[in-house]
Image (spheres, rainbow, N blue to C red):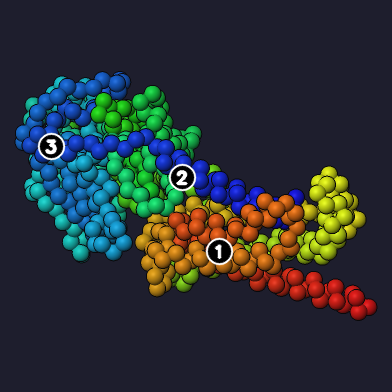
Amino acid sequence: MESQRSLLFIALMVVTYLLFSQWQLDNAPAVQTPAQSTTIENVSSNSDYIPQASEHTTSPTDKIVTNATLIDIKTNVLELKVNTQGGDIVEAKLLKYDTELNNGVPFTLMQNRTYTYIAQSGLIGSNGIDQIIAGRPIYSTTATNFTFNDNQQELIVDLTYQDENALSVIKRLTFSKNGYSVKVDYIITNHTNNNANVQLYGQLKQTIDIPKKSNGMPTSAYRGAAYATDEDRYNKFKFNDFEDEKINISTKDGWVAMIQHYFVAAWIPKDSGENQLYSNYTQNGEAIIGFKEPPLTIAANSTANTSAIIYIGPKDQNKMAKIADGLDLTIDYGFLFMISQPLFWLLTHIFDIVGNWGIAIIVITLIVKGGMYPLTKVQYTSMARMRELQPKMAALKERFGDDRQKMSQATMALYKKEKVNPAGGCFPLLLQMPIFLALYWVFLESVELRHAPFFLWIQDLSAMDPYYVMPVLMGISMFVMQKMQPVTVQDPMQQKIMKYMPVVFSVFMAWFPSGLVLYWFISNLISITQMKIIFSGIAKKKALASAK
């Protein structure tokens, strides 16, 4: 395989892969805008799916509740709305992340207005207070607004349910400074003379088909559910599968999550025995994924407690890895995660030193290209050998004309005689492509690069270059590289394709994250420099050999 054909093959492979990724996004389920949800006064207490202790397929009946209210909870990183009916989180805003670059509007991860995306939890079982027939409890609070003070390290919000003839429950939400994890404790008092049995459940419910906004950038970032067990650290469960399949898994460890680009919500139950993971699909087109902890027995006239953690926030690898095993895998680097994760680790450490993600990308490009220099030298040496054969190749072309069979036989004989491997430049390129694709996912999926500025006009390395300067520079660098390489392709059609490849790639890459285009541009500049050094070295050796 000749070097130009190798380059063409690699380029087409990359384009095909990225176009397939965009095809997956464009062929997602049709988007439907749900009707505006009703006000809190008309919330149906039993319209929520409530899992049962023995099974989770029964749908509750409707029951109108008129005295539920919303309470506001604000920390230094989260702003939540909690419905006193069930104590569900029905809205979550991330105060450190703007909806659009520098617009000052916090990103809304959860809501229950134009579509449903909420976090629910409760107590089921024979004595549970969350029941299909009786409905979900209405908790009381000491206030409707709770705010995290600057000097606070922890904020505790208690939701109280009192039934002196049976159970009294405190649903305690504990928030920490700079934390996206919320600890949910249930403190249960049994007022009866008999043992009481309850079971904690937590679930995430989200409308499958929601309005989506695209910035034109090709991306197949996963949106759907995921879960982990003690056997499998990370499993995707696509929204398309909810209607036809159901999760019903017992596991000692584990978690359940809803994932989207840059952000995640996840329930992490206690490691207290066999937890039950489950899923369900509602008639309203909502996906539900949740867990049930082992049943808890509260002795007569005594108090017991149980708890779980819910994470609502950005896909921060370091923080999530500490919360639960495999939770950091929700950062979807695709099948090359084993390459992407070390590259991200290196990128973050470089950023800690230089303080700018754009400069960090330049530095990691220098490191990657430097580490691959031995392969690059093999590739460019092969190119130089091929270039030396150009006069002889031209003579063969003139001799055999359009007789492709004889031309091919003569070409292979020439390669054998001159001891030149036409595939010498292909293998190094193939080895470099996984690194390029791995970096593509790092730049696309890492929330650290979301709205991260570089300099001048590039204020968001995760978005396309607004003025297309970087793609044009990348195309120019590709053109220079092309001129420095030997032209061994004889087919006129392939020659035309190679000629316009820089233009095609400039247009194609104009819609990709500017951080990725920056990487490719710097990589090309380094390749041009390496090419000049290697070609000059070969020329000097040849001149010295001729002088002798």
Q: Where does the image place residue 370, in percent across and percent down from the top left?
A: 64, 66
Whichever of callouts 3 and 2 sits on the residue coming sooner in the sequence is 2
Dot 1 falls on a residue whose secondary structure is helix
Does the rendering let one see residue 121? yes
User: Residue at (42%, 53%) from the top-left corner?
Assistant: 217
Q: Residue 22's mark?
A: 2
Circle 1 crowding by C-alpha within 10 Å: few under 14, some 14–19, many from 20: many
Task: Look at the numbered disc 2 and give the secondary structure of its residue.
Answer: helix
Residue visible at 25% across and 56% down in the picture: 106
Residue 475: give its label. 1
Q: Residue furthest left?
A: 67
* Residue at numbered disc 3: 38
Identified by mark 3, the residue type is Thr
Q: Is residue 272 visible?
A: no
Depth-wise, is mark 3 or mark 2 nearer the camera?
A: 2
Q: Label 3's element?
A: loop
The x, y position of residue 492, in whole percent, is: 70, 53
